[in-house]
Image: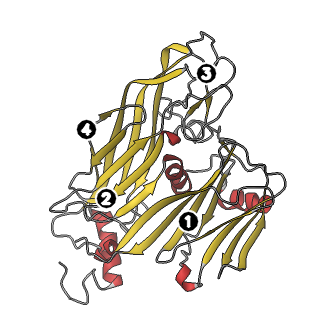
Amino acid sequence: MPGRDQNSPALNPAANEAARAALFAQGFFSSITLPTQVWSDSGSYAFDMPHAGIGLYASVRVNGTLTWTDTNGTPVAPVLSSRAPFNLFNSVVFKDYLGNTRISSSGPILHAIETFKTYADTAGETPNTTASRGYSNTAIDKFTPGAVSGTGVAVDFAFIVPFTLHENTTIGTLPFTVPSGNNTLYLTLNPLYSGLAAGTLNPDSPLQTAGTGHNTTTTANLTGATIEVTYYYVDPLPGMELPLMDFSQVYEIVDVKTTDNLSQNATKQIILPTGRTYQALYGELVNAGALTDTGVTNLKLLINESTPTLQETYGAYLHRIRRTYGRDMQVGQFLWDWRSRPISPSNYGSIAIQLLLGSGFTASGTSWFNLGKESLYVLQTQVY
């Protein structure tokens, strides 16, 4: 337990910041790759993080060979979901050794968060692939099934599970050198292929049907595939002061999927829960089984549930995103970013976001709105 010295990093913000700066200046950026686990369609996995250092993030990688077999013998290429390949991961949950759920999210939301934290301008990137994100090494970032192939095509993609507000800070994380218990990452997969009727889309499966050549007897498999998790952390020098105030907060990412008020001329509203300081929100609008922005007319941010403080036409919103970030969101994805000035509902009575749908929106098939909430909150139980 930390002492009661008023100059302690547990009590003094200046001392805490000095300890954090020293940690990143003198500590070692380190990593440990955990034993791989064999990929299984719709499988579930648990990875216990090493008892080492102060956690920054984990990289989750899928590596294997994709085979796509049409029993009709018709060489029709599969169609990729607009959320592929990251929607292979239906659920990504991180629980600390005290049982606190710090992350309860999905692959697409975690990828969107990392995109706007880290990636440079990738305007014009190809939708539905991990390629064209400003990289040139063709040995990684591969998920392009192409046509039916008897020999298969390589798959190799990854996404980041963050344990802290940013990899250059320890705000919201904890020392993973806990004496007992485990900090555990749980992964649950969607089916690789939805197995639906020809021409049907399923937003929760990376591979879709393409035409009359595909049907429920079409199969997809990742042969020789593994799931690899690499843990990245900062390792302090012996005797270093630690930024203890940083560990009194929890960095949290939570997804909430809803289906109400998705119709013509409807207002989709979500009120943010209290007790959190919000860094950003990431939305996904799915209709007819695919990400879409058809029919979206306006976006609003409200305080006290009734006073608009930011209201934009969809066109104005798109221009603001491009001007701010030098890139576009993927069609059907939405971003509300307060990282430079985090907001808390307790300061305003309430905070709500609205997505206004006009006459151009027609609900069809699978329709939902998924909102990923990135926030900090104060932990009541000490983790050091």
Residue type, label 3: Asn
Toward the viewer: 185 or 127? 185
Residue type, label 1: Ala
Visible residue check, residue 28: no
The answer to whether 31 is drawn above or below residue 165 in the figure is: above
Residue type, label 4: Pro
Mark 2 or mark 4, which has the lower sequence index?
4
Mark 3–mark 1 contact, CB under 8 Å?
no
* Residue at x-position 56% and y-position 38%: 84
Which residue is the site of mark 1? 280
* Rendered location of residue 156, percent (x, y): 45, 32
Which residue is the site of mark 2? 55
* Residue at x-position 19% and y-position 59%: 181
Q: Within 10 Å of the Cα at label 2, are there few (<14), some (14-19), or many (20+) other Cα atoms?
A: many
Secondary structure category for the residue under label 3: loop
Foreground tag (2 vs 1): 1
Residue type, label 2: Gly
Q: Residue furthest top?
A: 73
